[in-house]
Structure formats: structure tokens, C-alpha cells
Amino acid sequence: MAAFGRQVPPSLPDETLVTARGRAALLPDLLVDARRIANNVTAGWHGRRQRGIGENFWQFRPYVDGEGTARIDWRRSAREDHLFIRDKEWEAAHTVWLWADDTPSMLYKSRLASVSKQERALIIVLALAELLSRSGERIGWPGMTHPFTSRNGAERIAMRLAQIGQAASLPDFSAIKRYSDIVIASDFLDLPDITKARLNPLVERGVRAHLVEIVDPAEEEFPFAGRTEFHDPESGETLTAGRAETMAADYRNLYLARRAELSEWCKRQGWSFTTSHTDHQASEALAAIHMALSTDRASVSAGGR
Amino acid sequence: MGWFPISFTMPFVLVGLFALPLIWYLLRLTPPRPQAEVFPPLRILAQLVSRQETPDRSPWWMTLLRLLLIALVVFALADPVLNKRENLAQEGDALAIIIDNGWASAPDWQDRVATAGRLIDDAEAAQVPVLLAFTAERPNAEIGPFDAQTARDHLRAAEALPVPVDRKSVLSRVEQALTSFARPEIAYLNDGLLGADGAEVDDRALRNVLAKNVSSLIWGKADLSKLVGLANASNEAEGLRLTAIRAQPATEATSISAGAFDERGRRIGETRIAFPAGEVTGTALVSAPFELRNDFSSIALDGQEQAGAVRVLDESAKRRRVGLIAQAESDSAQPLLSPLFYIRKAIAPFADMIEVPSADLVEAVPKLLEQQPAMIIMADIGVLPESSRKALFDWVEKGGTLVRFAGPHLAAGSKDDDLLPVKLRGGERALGGTMSWTEPQALTDYAQSGPFADLPRPDSVTVTRQVLAEPSADIASRTWASLSDGTPLVTGRQQGEGRLVLFHVTPEATWSNLPISGNFVDMLRRIIQQSRNQGRVFANVQGAVISMPPYRMIAADGSLIAPTPDARPLMGTDSKVTIENPPGLYGNEDGVFAHNLLPEGSALTALERPQVSMKISEITYGPDRTQELRGPLFGIALLLLLIDTLATMWLGGAFARRWKRPASTAHLGLLLIAGGFALSLLAASAVLADDAKPGDQEAIEAISTTRIAYVITGDKAIDDISRAGITGLNRFIVEKTALEPGEAAGIDIASDELSFYPLIYWPVDANADMPDEAAMARIDAYMRQGGTVLFDTRDQYGQDFDGPDASPSTLRLRELLADLNVPPLEPVPSDHVLTKSFYMMPDFPGRFTGSPLWIEASTATENSAERPVRVGDGVSPILITANDLAGAWAIDNAGEPLLPTLSGDYMQREYAYRGGVNIMMYMLTGNYKSDQVHVPSLLERLGQ
């Protein structure tokens, strides 16, 4: 009898890009909340719905003594007795780091799923890259690119991925600066403590992280029964279960407990934690991350400003 | 094999069963192979359990299953046989099989045949000849010795017959036939019943045949427990009394149902015949209304498919014959005053009336008695002649019923008549009337002792006049109906086996209104029911033996069938049941005689096996129940294997996953099966659709348009001209008419199908090969079926067929036509439809103008002068010209004429085309144009 799940070859980034574009097309432009972060601002393309540095007219307001006279709009002021200042709309960009896990454990696809975990992670990340690039945000791939602004950011990332490839289970986070966001798509199958220890540098640096857990339904439901030999694609270890169905309930408890712990920890940090099942649509998870990226951290976390 | 019904052909294979413990040991060791699965979250799983122990043993039931499987296979290999048949016939140097095929063998005849077939098989295996004798066959039937194959043929041809067996003669024949063998073996498949001749005859016959140097006897044991015969069916007052007999009494009371059937086989009555415990006879009454009982044609026991359980009924069990005698029959002008009128009306529905025209009693009474009536009604006859009186008295003594009516003659006649139930006083008494004080008397209730006891009291009947009985001691017991003052109105008494009845009133409505009341009918009917027919119609002709043709026969299975070829007319009524006279109804529609298998009062007695000192083996009848068990055992083993496979898959967890995922391989399998089925259907439909034959394409092309054909002569120049000519004509036709002919078709008359073409142009070439006979036959058939051949000799001078100076082409044409059925010919007459079918054409020129166009001569019809065209049906099958029409029609690719006309006249070519158009139109429309002459008169009528 055929095995339930199998190891699949890694999907190529440029092929995945097409799917990712399709997914991204379903979502509106991403407005990353970066109101709080003054340092990091570079000129972006979209308005922030408030006055600031930019090119588009925002409002006229009465001149207050002390402001530079160069900003007085004489044409407007000539119509009345008061002096008016022409405010421009603040247009700013934000840095969002993107990263997708590419370890062998991600190359798993069970019969219940339509895509492998790796492909799903790439789709989500590239779709985000597409969305963010469209909105003029700066995106980057830790360990591979610096943050950059580009209309075709997703394509550039995909090309770089195709050229270089990567294998580290977690990237080098040293380049990530404070106040930027990072999206990490992985299966987070390590024990929670290990995962937390790895992500700790981000906490220390004040980076807002969005964890996207990619889950194959077979991993979650444990549909195996009978005498089964399990094989870990990463470590190569095997484990033989005489009656696999008897372990299902306990395993499910453990599995969900790990996710709950991780999710709870993220919440405490003010991070978002999203789960994407490979038998579901990628858009579902994408919409959730989209939401997390565009809302204020204050409304997400209990911390407040 | 004794009590154990299974035996093994190859028992040594069973040694393989000793391997079972070893297999058991091996099976216990091998666990099922684990299912390999990639599983990334192994680390989480590893937390759960460090090491899952693997079961190193299969479940016990799986081991058991596999052991059972192997044991089954071993058993199957040993080739077990259930109910293995014993080989019986292997003793002697010949086998005589004697089979009773009488009526009692019919229910299990097939079993007997199967048993006999096995005996023949055994004899064949032992290579001994077979004698095959049937005890109910004709005495001259062949009994052998046969070889096995012939014996089988004889056995297959034999069938059970609805007649008793004749053991005596058949066994003696077997005895003679066995003298030539040293130690024959006898198998007697008997029916278990003693023959009609009795125990001694049968026993002696058996002993005789066994007294010879017979080596052994195989004695068939018939099952008599279910055999029931119908010994009698007699008509009684309340119903039909059935008597059933059986050969073996049962220890407890049983019953069998019987049905009564009418002539068309409809079941119109039934009853249950009960056999008390230990009795061999049971009776029952089919109670049915009298009229319905008359319709009974046969009685059959249910579930008994043999002739002995069926009885046919004839007239003697049916309608009574009633003789009518009146002394002075009134003239027919006053029927209501006839003394017999009301009697006839009353009894007509349920009795047959016999009347003798003679008024002379000396003559009439014997004639009436010849008819053996059940009842005789005498209306007001006072004194009988002595001879008649004696004859009547004897008849009554034997069971006849005499009914007399009073009247003036009786009142005046003999008072001490022994044909009267009571003594009568002289004269009659009148009640009521102008001179009397008394009132007409009504009737009281019927006497309880009489036959009318259960009839309702007659209320409306009044009696004004009657004859009176002498009072006597027993008058009350003889009175069946009386008036309210107690004087008897109807009296009756038993006389011998018969009965005397007297109505004390007249049979017409003068003395009372009894004859015109319904009670009269009831009374007569009741009396008739209690009477009995005295003998049968056929027995009455003195001395002569009557021959009755077979009418309905009882088949061996108890059904009524049309007469079999063997059936001969029944001579006399006391004939035995034989092959020539099988049981059934004899006679015709007017009257039948029931010839029944079991005589009345017969009994079924079991046949005893003779006590002889030789090897005797008894067999029971039945089909060969030998059954090979190898196949079923292998089947069960295969099933177990399937179960084992499924169980292994289940243990491997296959189904747990299957159930979560609908699109499993099971579905795939179903899909494959469905796909295969659909594919086979497609293939089947493709096979159905592909009924094309070679040549179909050509045929379709040939008939999709109208095409003119020409005969390929083999000379290329002539063929080219023919082709070009028809092409030119086609072009002209297309231009001028609504017809658009297809391309010219060159045909080989020897091979091509001709019937596609309305016209075949045949340029006669003297140098061409003469077509063979078959080709000419084809042409002949073509012409007879409506086709037309246009012969063109292409030499204008050959217009005279018979002349000595004929051209070579004409000579060749003459040769051609010699093989054809050529009708009488004539040049186209000026009023022929061919001259008018499209253009008005006086003649038909081609390149030449000299030759006429010959055509089938029209039958001389009385054409009226004013008709421009002669009428006549059909199209001439042959046209002959010498004008080289094709030459004139021929054009080249550019449309220019190929050949010059002889005269060089432009119009001649035009006329040639027109002639061609006319010919073509004539071909296609026939005499349509000649019918056009009616158009003016039709239009004229329409206009009015």
C-alpha cells in the first residue's frame, strides 16, 4: 500500500511566483502600520492620511508664528486676511522582512493536502512580497538581501531564491533593525523552547514578528493506523508504531499544545501567529497576515502605545 | 462409504495435512510488514513514546484462517466426492433392465430413467450387453440386447404410459432373450404395485425369469407412500362421491385434496379426501349444485401427477335422461293444454328429455326404455298394456324412477296398479266450484320424511281437483306433499331399486295451479336429482359392438390431452385399458364414454419381491447425486484467501485511511470496471455500426445522382466517344431541362451493378469480344426489371436486321439479341410518347440520319383518333438505332463537337441532342406525357 505522505521535490520560486501573484491579486494593497516608527521612514508611495513629507496636497491650515515662511501658500492666503500654510500628505514606507522555511521537513505533502508545505510557505511569502512591493514598502529577505523598494519586489526575491537557495533552519537576524516587521513562514516543528530561543533576538531588538505556521493536515490529524514505521526527513530517525491509531489522540494533544504555547508566547510579545493548512486556500492565511500587518500593534497586543 | 457420504479419489494427498503444524509454527512467527510513512513531526511523536513495541505474532484468528485455507486446499486436491455412487452392475455377462413404465411410474419417471441410465453406464464400463424392456410397451417392442449407446437411445425415447403394466408377456420375452447368456444380471425397476392380473401371475412371471441362471438381481424399491389413485366417482343426491385408494396405509390420518374440472379444464369444485389412520381407502363428497355437477368432466387428485389419480366422467354421471309419455298428445295448436307442456318447461334446464313420437304404448314404452332413461314421466295414463307394464315394472325394479300424473284417465283407470305408490279410489274429488261448498285447498308443509322436506312451504298453490288415495297404514309415510286437509297430493314409494311417484293432479293447470308455480319445478328437480341413469347410451344397441373414437385422453401425468396416435377406437364398453385404448373419454361431442384406468372398487396392492436365492441388491430411484466437491472447496479457499488479504490490509491500517479519503483505489477500481464496461459497450456499438460491405461507397455514388451509363467495349476510341457523347448530352440536358444528370458511368456488364442506371448506352462493336452468357443474363435481367438498353450500331445503313447485307455491327447486334428476351420491335411510331416526351421529334438523328429508332412494339390498342399520343404502360426495355447518337453528342473539353455530322447541318446535331433529351425524359417519366392529354379536359372540369 502506498504511503500516506511523501517527500516532494522543492518547488521552484519562479513557478511559485505565478501562484503567489494570483493570491496577492485577491487582496488590497497592504498598508503597513508604521505610524509609530519615525526613524525608519523613507519616502514611500502611499499616503498616510496625515500631514507630513510628501508631494500631494493634504490641507491648508492657518500659519502659526515660528513656522518657516517658505511654507506659506501665498495664493491661498491672498484670498483672505490670514496666512495659510499648505500641508502635504505624509507618504512613508516601512521595512518588512520576509522569510520562508526551506528545510527538508517542509518538503512534505500528504495525500490529504494539495500542495507541499514548502510551496505553501513560498506562496504566502511571495504573495506578501508582491503586496508590499505594490504598496511601496521596503522588503527584504534576511541573510539574502538588504531591504529594498521595488515595484517588482516579489520577482527579485524569487530570482534571488532561485539563484542562491537556502537551507538554514532559521536565518541570521542580525541585519534586522528595530521597528521593522518580519514574516516567518515555517512549520515550527521544533520543540517550543528551541523555537523561542531562536526567535529571542528579535524580541530583544523590538522587531515585530508575524509567525506563519504551515501545517499539513496529516500532521495535525494523524490519520495513520496499523503497524506503521515513521521516518523523520530531517534527522533520518525512524520510529515504528505497532498500532498507530492508538497514539493518535495523545499525539494530537501534544501537537496542539505546542501550537498553543507558541501562539500564546507570540501574543505576549505583541506578535501575530497565523496557521495555514495546506489543504486550505493560501488566501485564508494571507488575509490573516494582511490584517495583522496593517493593523496597529496596539489593537493586536494588549501592550498599547 | 457407509454413513460418511464423502469419499476421496486421491486419499494419499491428505497426507499433506500433516504439514499443518509446521505451517502453524511459521505463521505464528511472521508479523505483517509495517507501513512506511514519512512524518516530519517525528520529534513530537517521539515525546509520546520512545519505542513502540511491535507485535511479533499474528492474531490467533488470522492464523486459524490461514490454516483452514491450507487444509481446504489439501482437501480439494484430494478430490472429494459426495454421495459417491456404487457400481452395481458388474456381476454378469449381460444386464437385463426391466422397467415398469405404467401409470404408477409417471410421478418419478425421470428418477427411474436416471437410475436406468446409471445402470447402463455401469454395463458399459463392464462391457456387457444390455437388454432393455418396458412392461407397458407394445408386446412387439424391441428389447435387445443392445450396446450401451443404443440402450441409452431407447431409454431416452421411452416414457411412462397411462396404462397398467403387462408383466406376464414382457417378462416371458426377457426370459427367452436371456437364454443366450450364461449368467445374466437382472435389474427390475418396478413400480411397486401388483398388476391387474393379481399376485400369482406377477409372482410366477418373476420367478420364471429369475429361475434362469441369473447371477444377481437388482430390485428397485418404489416409494408407494405418496401414490394415491381415484377408484370411483359416483353421483349421489348431495354431490359427487369420490373414493380414493392408496397402496400403503399411513399411521396417522392424512387427507388429499381433489378438484373437479369442467370440459375446458376449469376447476369448478373441490373437496378433501380424508384417509383415516391405517386405512387405504378414503371418501369424500364434492358438494356442488346439481347443475354445476353436470358440468364436471373430470376429477383429479391434487399433487398426483399420474393417470390413476384422474377419473373422467361421462353422461352416466351427468344429466338425467327423462322419458315423457302422454296418452293423448293435444294438437300443437293448443300447446298450453298439452299434458306435457309444463313438464317440458320445468325439466328442460336440468334434464334431457326423450320422447317417442308413437302414441301406441306397446310401441312407445320399449323404445323409451331402450334409451335407458333415469326417469319416465307418464301424464295421465290410466291403463297400460300388459307388456309395457311389465317392462316398466322391471325397469323400476332396477332403479328407474317412474313419475305419474293424475287425470281423467287415471281416475277412471286401474285402481290397483303396481306402478302406483298408493292405491287410488275411483274417481276424483273436486274442491270449490259453483256447486260445492268447499274452497280450493292450499298445501301444507312438505312431509319431513319425503324428498321435499327441505323445500319451503308452497304458499300460492291451490288445488281444485285431485284423485284420492285409499287410506292405508303406510299412507302417511308415502305422502311427500299433502293438502291442508291432509289428503295426499304427491305420494311416492320405493319399488325395488327404483321409485314410484304420483302427483295426484294433472300436469297441466286444469286441476290445480301447481304446474304453473315454481314449486312444481322444485319438486320435479328434486325427484330427478334422486333418480339415476339406467345404463349408458352406447350399451343399448343390442348385440352390436359400438366403436367409439378416442375423444380426450388422460396423459401419463394426469392431464387431459388430445388423442395420441396410438389410441384406437374403443370397441365395446367393457374393454380393458391398454396402449391402444388408453384411459380417457371416447365418443364425440354428442356423447362420451368414460374409460377409466382404475376400475371401481379396485385396490392398490404392493408388489412383493419374490423370495429367490441369489445375490439381491436393492436400489432406490433418484438422479445421480454424486457431487464433486473439489470446485466448491477451492472456491471457499479462494474466499478465505480474499478474507485473509482484506484482513491483512485492515491490520496494516489500509481502511482507516481509506475512509477519510473518498477517492481511494476502491473507487479507482470501480471506475476502471465502469470504464471497461463502457468501453466494451462502445466496442459493441462499433461492431453493430460497422455493417458496411465492400462496394457500398461506389453504390452510394452511383445512385446519389441520376447517371447515364455506357457499356465499355474495350475499344478505347469507342469508349472515349461514348463517354464524350454522354457528357455532351448531359450538358445539353442540364441546360434545357430540370434534370441534372451525374457524370457518365462506364460499366462492365460482366461485373458492375446495372440496376443503378436508368439507361445504358451500348455502342455495338463488331470487333469487341462477345459478352459471355452470364453477362448477357445480367443484361436480360436488367431489361426485365425495368432498365433500358440503347443499342447503337453506329452505321446508318444497318436498318434492316434480317437482310443478308447486314453490316458487321448489325450482325453482332443480331448475335447479342439472340441471347436476350427481345420483345417485338417497331420503328418509333409518330404518335409514340417518345416523340413528345420533351421536344416534338419526327425522327431521331445522330451523326447519321438514315436509321429509324427501333422500340418495343406497342400493343395494338383502340386508340381514339383524337388522342395525339398512344397510351400504354411501361418503358421500352430496348432501343436500337444505327445513327451513332453518341458521335453526334460527343464534345471535347472545350465544349466543341468532336465529330462532324454526316450532312454538316448544324441543326442535325441539335436534333440529335433533342432526341437524346426525349429518350432520357422517356426513361424517367415513362408514359407520363401521354397522360398529359387529359390535362385540357381536367382543366375544363375544374373551371366549371
Image (cartoon, coloured by chain):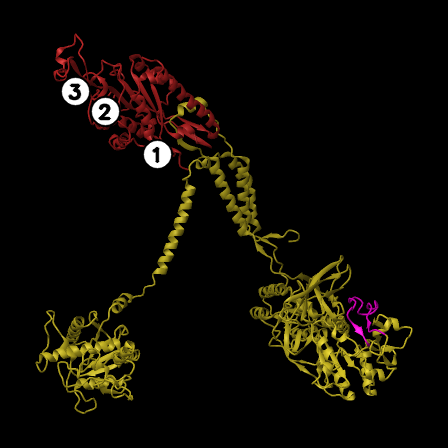
Label placed on residue A114: 1
Label 2 resides on the chain identified as A
User: Residue B926: x, y in percent?
Assistant: 26, 78
Label placed on residue B704: none
Chain represented in yellow: B
Mark 1 surroundings within 10 Å by alpha-carbon count, few (fewer than 14), some (14 through 19), many (20 or more):
some
Circle 1 sits in a helix, a strand or a loop, which is it? loop
Label 1 resides on the chain identified as A
User: Residue A247: x, y in percent?
Assistant: 47, 27
Q: Which label sits in the foreground, 3 or 2?
A: 3
Q: In which quarter of the image is residue A171?
A: top left
- Give the color of chain A as drawn: red
Q: What residue type is labelled 3?
A: Glu
* Residue B459, placed above or below residue B406: above
Q: Which label sits in the foreground, 1 or 2?
A: 2
Give the residue furthest to the right: B473
